[in-house]
Image: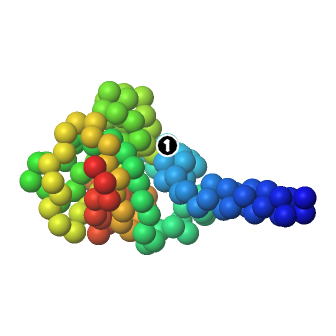
Amino acid sequence: MKKWSMFGVLLLLAGNVLAQAKFDAWHEFAKTKFEPKYNEKLGEYIFFPNFPAELKALAGKEITVEGFYVPFAPEDSQYIILSKYPQSQCFFCGGGGPESVIEVNFTKSPSRFKVDDVITVKGKLVLNPDDMDHVNFILKEAAVVSK
């Protein structure tokens, strides 16, 4: 009986460790709060991110992100945009917020992707608080893990 109890405890602990090991980038990005600030150059209010401390701690570290390919980057570029949602629901076309997209900059030219391909990439996380030419979350030195 004691053997079975110990076996059960070990199974529970192993399951708990595995559950904690899975990193969900979109969940972490969603913790970002956005504050409207007036932009003189554009003459309108723009939402600027206020990144939480736990996300700031990930800056510069390698993370893995799985998302939908959305074709908003020039075809001959070294980067793509991934979204938490398919194109019809993404930040640019649907109801997703700025926390639901990431710019992925590859070290090598990426293969061609089709709209809404589900792609997993890994790279170093960069947080972008104010450069209007890029989204708020960027993956540098990225590589495709799976397509």
Q: Position of residue 135 (x, y in %)?
A: 35, 51
Question: Residue extending furthest left?
Answer: 76
Give the image location of residue 42, x and y in percent.
Answer: 31, 43
Q: Residue at x 44, y 38 (%)?
A: 97
Q: Element at badge 1?
A: strand
At 52% from the left edge and 52% from the top edge, which residue is drawn? 24
Q: Which residue is mark 1?
A: 36
| Residue at x 43% of width, y 34% of height | 96
What colouring does the structure picture have?
rainbow
Q: Which residue occupies the extreme right position in the image?
A: 1
Q: Residue furthest bottom?
A: 60
What amino acid is labelled 1 in the image?
A: Pro
Q: Is any atom of residue 103 visible in this view?
A: no
Relative image position of residue 75 (x, y in whole percent): 11, 48
Q: Is residue 90 above or below residue 66?
A: above
Q: Mark 1, residues whose alpha carbon is within 10 Å: few (<14), some, or many (≥20)?
A: few
